[in-house]
Amino acid sequence: MKKALVIVGTRPEAIKLIPVFKELKRSKHWLTLLISTGQHHEMLKSIFDFFEVQPDIDLAVMTKNQSLAGLTGLLLSACTTVIENHSPDLIIVQGDTTTAMVGALAGFYKRVPIAHIEAGLRSYDKTAPFPEEVNRRVISAMADFHFAPTKTAAEALKYERVQGKIKVVGNTVIDSLIFATKKVSKQLKKFDRKYTNVVDQYERMILITGHRRESFGDGFKNICKAIQVLASTYPKISFVYPVHLNPNVKDVVFNMLDGLPNVYLINPVAYDDMVYLMTKSYLILTDSGGVQEEAPSLGKPVLIMREKTERPEGVEAGCSLLVGASQKRIVKAVKNLVDNTRKYKSMARAVNPYGRGDSAARIVSCLRNEI
Ligand code: UDP
């Protein structure tokens, strides 16, 4: 048996890695350990509970007001100790977080092969998203297996002449979304009751999420101004916004939007609630990577509140549109989709370019042949 360490630290990583972890657990070829670094401690717990998995090791490295440098230092020594104690044959990391970058670095220093899930995403701007763009480029320099979600991502890796095997497998986020929609559909009544005031009492609902560092300051102010305008233009539409807990986001959003009659500022929601709300929404305004990938599978147009995206496939397929953190562009794009049903339908009908729900199986089968 070969030993694999699956390292997760944040909510999106857990959502995207648990299908791979479960698939490895099912295979007799692997002894698999789930390592949680605890970068997003509370949010991780809720994801583990939802997917009914528990980490084998919890490094619990996050402390209050942790700096990036502090987190990096703690993670490197904690991950190195885990590798020394368990001598794995493979380390699996996902995406572009500090956990993923440092987990890979610890493996690289110990000469353990590294598999990188969701490899090859690029904005080619080291400041946006910060620090994720550099994290993922650094991981590409160290990884031995690059599991790209799309052809575009694989081409970026080939262009950069990264070493190791590159394979296009789709995005595991769709594996999880399928699992989650099935689970949510069995509890629809519970969710209908919970969200009746924001869903049933309005003609439509627009869902909003936003947390990117690049939008702190003026960016979030512009986003909020756009929501103010839209909320007063469309009183029969509810605007539901699970607000990220970071004070740079929360303070501005509450200052500018709290109290508007059809705007609902709620705490970040559990993954199953999020899947329910996405399903019930008319369209989604977001800067989130995962949401950009999930929404097309649910037939929901996405307006991306960023200037650039490392997920251009959705824009090219017609599922999403870049609107920046610009009041004017957000208002115009929402109006266009609310007032023009033809435009709306063409976006809602586009085919999801990010995956079919079989990515974890494809990854594990590829690794089986290689290790
Ligand atoms: N999500 C969630 N609750 C929320 C907001 C997002 O469960 O309140 C989910 C969302 O469906 C997606 C993932 O979290 O699967 C995306 O996480 P996030 O936006 O934090 O990170 P990104 O994808 O931008 O890295």
Image: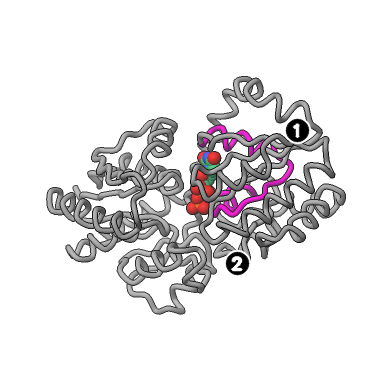
Image: magenta residue range: 271-295
Query: Which tag is nearer the camera, tag 2 or tag 1?
Result: 1
**Residue 36 colored in magenta in the image:** no
SS for tag 1?
A: loop
Type of residue at label 1? Pro
* x and y, in percent, of residue 54 in the image: 32, 34
Vertical arrangement, residue 331 with respect to residue 191, above or below:
below
Left or right side of 55 for 274: right
Residue 126 pos. (x, y %): 47, 71
Residue shown at 55% from the left, 35% from the top? 267
Crowding at label 1, few (<14), some or many (≥20) Cα neighbours within 10 Å? few
Q: Compared with residue 219, is residue 240 higher up or lower down, i.e. above or below?
A: above
Residue 175 in percent (x, y) is at 49, 44
Residue sitting at the far left: 85
Q: Is residue 133 above or below residue 205?
A: below
Examine the residues drawn in magenta and state their main secondary structure.
helix
In this view, the residue in front, 361 or 158, is 158
Residue designated by label 1: 261
State which quadrant residue 265 falls in. Answer: top right
Mark 2, secondary structure of its residue: loop
Q: Inspect the image, locate mark 2, and give the three-letter code of the amino acid beneath it.
A: Lys
Q: What residue is disc 2 on?
A: 308
How far is mark 2 from mark 1, CA to CA? 32 Å
Residue at figure coordinates x 46%, y 79% from the top left: 159
Relative to 352, 116 lies left or right = left
The residue at the point 42 percent across, 78 percent down is 160
Q: Residues within 10 Å of mark 2 (few under 14, many from 20)?
A: some
Magenta stretch: residue 277 in it? yes
Residue drawn 82% across and 51% down?
335
Q: Is residue 177 visible?
A: no
Instruction: Answer with left or right where residue 343 lies relative to residue 173.
Output: right
Tag 2–tag 1 contact (CB < 8 Å): no
